[in-house]
Amino acid sequence: MYPMARITFGWAAPLLVGLVLVAGCSRSPEAQKARHLERGDKFIERAQYREAILEYRNVLKFDPANARAIKQLGLAHYHLGEMAQAFRYLLKTQEFTPDDLDVRLKLGGIYYLGGKREEARDAALSVLGQQPKTLDALALLADTASTPEEIDATIQRLEAARADLGDRAKLHLGLGVLYLRKRDLPRAEAAFQEAVAREPKSIESHSMLGAFYLVKRDVAQAEREFKAAADLAPIGSPARLTLANFYLSAQKPDEAKRILSEITQQNPDYLPAWRRRAEIAFQERNYDESLKALQAILKKNPSDLEGHLLQGRVRLAKHETTEAIQEFQQVLKLDPRNAVGHYQLGLAQLQAGSLQQAKAELKEATSIAPNFTDAVLALAELNIQSGAVQPAIEDLEKFVARQPGVFRAYTLLGSAYLAKREPAKATELFRRLVTLAPQDPRGHYFLGVALRAEAKPLEAKKEFEAALTLAPAYVEPLADLAAMALAEKQRDAALSRVTRQIALAPKAGGLQYLLGNVYLARGEPALAEGAFLKAIELEPQRVDAYMQLGSLYQSSGRYDEALLKLNEALKADPQNVQAQMLVGIVYERKGDFPKAQETLEKILTQNPRLAVAANNLAMLYLEHGGDKEKALALAQTAKEVAPDDPHISDTLGWILYQRGVYQQAVSLLRESAAKLPENPVIQYHLGLASMKAGDKEGAKRALSAAVNSPVAFTGKDEARRTLAELK
């Protein structure tokens, strides 16, 4: 409820600015400074805040400690709604003039908007200590009252001011907010209505009465008040934006878009409307339309932090990773401690395959904002996936203690305990989760997973069944039940349990997908194919079913059908890397090596550091007439990104062997063979490299392992011949 500054925009003519700069060259620094100050003040009077900012910044070039310019910069940014920039200048102003109550109050408002309630409340109380009847300070005090004692004390304070300020709407709005927090809806409604009665043309009063009616779920009354506020407000105003947001929440997107379009057409300098248009287009996955709106913002204000943030997210969604990274880096250049910027940059680095850089950015985000849920969970998940389980556990235990209601934090912490082979801790944690949310089927499912890890199958099955009772179409617990039956060699029981559940949820494509996997486990590919096709019929966007069909067809040599299904998967999800990788594999198996290379090259254009794609393309270049230098560079990139992957070590080692770098090749191939001792191709590679490096005994051991393997592979005859020569 604390009043936000009215946001207006205006732009000075470039020619005029140019003339001023030229004329200024002939004046002394003091004269130029005075001229810029005078011009800045005039722009402020006309509410041309953007132009005023340029003038005051010019003042600081001559006099970096000019108190007036610093204060006016803070106020100009405040009026534009640019609170991060305003805060910096107003905080400096407070150092110069600690008794400036207006500045102190505005800082309090910024603290409140930034979630720092205690600092905001202290600012309000400080102002009221000197001027007890300051209405804006009373309003901020009302906004920051949270405990029952604070709410009652603030109500008494506002009631005491009624004699002096009772004719002002803002006093009654403060009372309305406080009564609403007490859940005294009749008194809250009366207070908001009194505010409107006192000042019928108060935009804020109509807006807050509309928000109150939304709390009461009286949509018709809310619409009436929001429209009244919008009609009173200028075309480019928060009230018009609020009306558009109301229509979005009321499932009337066309009305919302109409209002936003009117604002941007009639007042194109009102950037929040462009931003909302960009956000809506982004949510609707209309990325090009979103970028168009963002260009309008950044053309008018190249330093618009939120604009760069959203543009980075759009680029990330389009898998334009390099451009996304550049946008987020620009955000951090403007605001180095922007937690959201670090978080988004972390996601972009992850998409680029830069695991360590992603971790570093996510860690920075959580150090700046320890309660930033998305960043904490993303970092924990990344740590778990990369084997850094203990740091994930430490971070999540602290987070759960601070925020015990975040479901995903429990599931990740439990997964970390399981990864550390501490299933008892996971079980204890998930029991707490079931107690916290007994009707949430996920709690029962995760408890079942932990009990299964503790080798308590009967208790685990009980929890999986409990999850399915709460959510009959829940695939994961049924998948575990089927997997347990298959592990116990009860193939018929697995099939029976899945078909029984399908009878309870016949329209669930996920259950049909699971049925297909059970048929595959039973060695019944024809029935599996039928189940996957049924899953797609029920859920046409089910990418995993398309991919299973693609794998099924390619394993039986039906390459064209495989490609058809995989292309359908990519229509549903054009950026699905697994589907793209499978397309490359199918082309390779089909013998169409140029197409396989082209597919992998396209993947690496979007994800330059995707280790598996770089590795596979390196092998294709090496073995099928590609660029050998590129093959080496790709293998080295893959090794850098995934240093512990034995397949990548094999690829790089084999390339080095082909180039005559035998000692390095042997080192990499030994590393690979130690992790995959049963892989005959790796043993074959190690045998040849060891022989060239002069290690005949090592060569004999590796080649013997390759030759004695029951698996057929290209090079087996050469392995036999070489082994015979060594003997």
Image (cartoon, grey):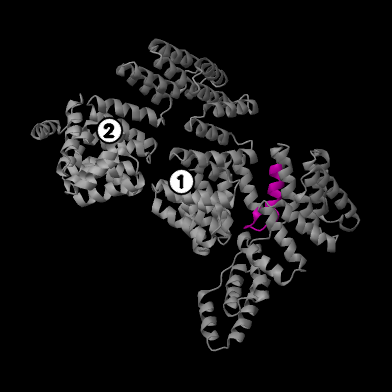
Q: Are marks 2 and 1 in contact (CB under 8 Å)?
A: no
Q: Nearer the viewer, residue 669 or 107?
A: 669
Q: Measuring 50% from the left and 44% from the top, which residue is drawn there?
A: 379
Mark 2 lies on residue: 563
Q: Is residue 443 left or right of residue 533?
A: right
Q: How many marks?
A: 2
Q: Is residue 124 above or below residue 652?
A: below
Q: Is residue 383 left or right of residue 444?
A: left
Q: Is residue 226 magenta?
A: yes
Query: Hey, what amino acid is under mark 1?
Result: Asn
Q: Secondary structure at mark 2?
A: helix
Mark 2 or mark 1, which is nearer to you? 2
Q: CA distance from mark 2 to mark 1?
A: 28 Å
Query: Hey, what amino acid is under mark 2?
Result: Leu
**Segment tinted magenta in the rendering:** 222-238
- Is residue 318 in sight in this rendering? no
Query: Residue 541's image quarter?
Result: top left
Q: Measuring 25% from the left and 26% from the top, which residue is drawn there?
A: 555
Mark 1 lies on residue: 286
Q: Is residue 727 above or below residue 243?
A: above
- Is residue 648 in sight in this rendering? yes
Question: Residue 377 at what x, y percent from top left?
Answer: 53, 41
Q: Secondary structure at mark 1?
A: loop
Q: Nearer the viewer, residue 376 or 190?
A: 376
Mark 2 or mark 1: which comes first in sequence? 1
Q: Measuring 15% from the left and 38% from the top, which residue is drawn there?
A: 696
Question: Residue 185 at what x, y percent from top left?
Answer: 80, 39
Crowd rating for badge 2 (residues with CA inside 10 Å; few <14, some 14–19, many 20+): many
| Predominant SS along the magenta part | helix
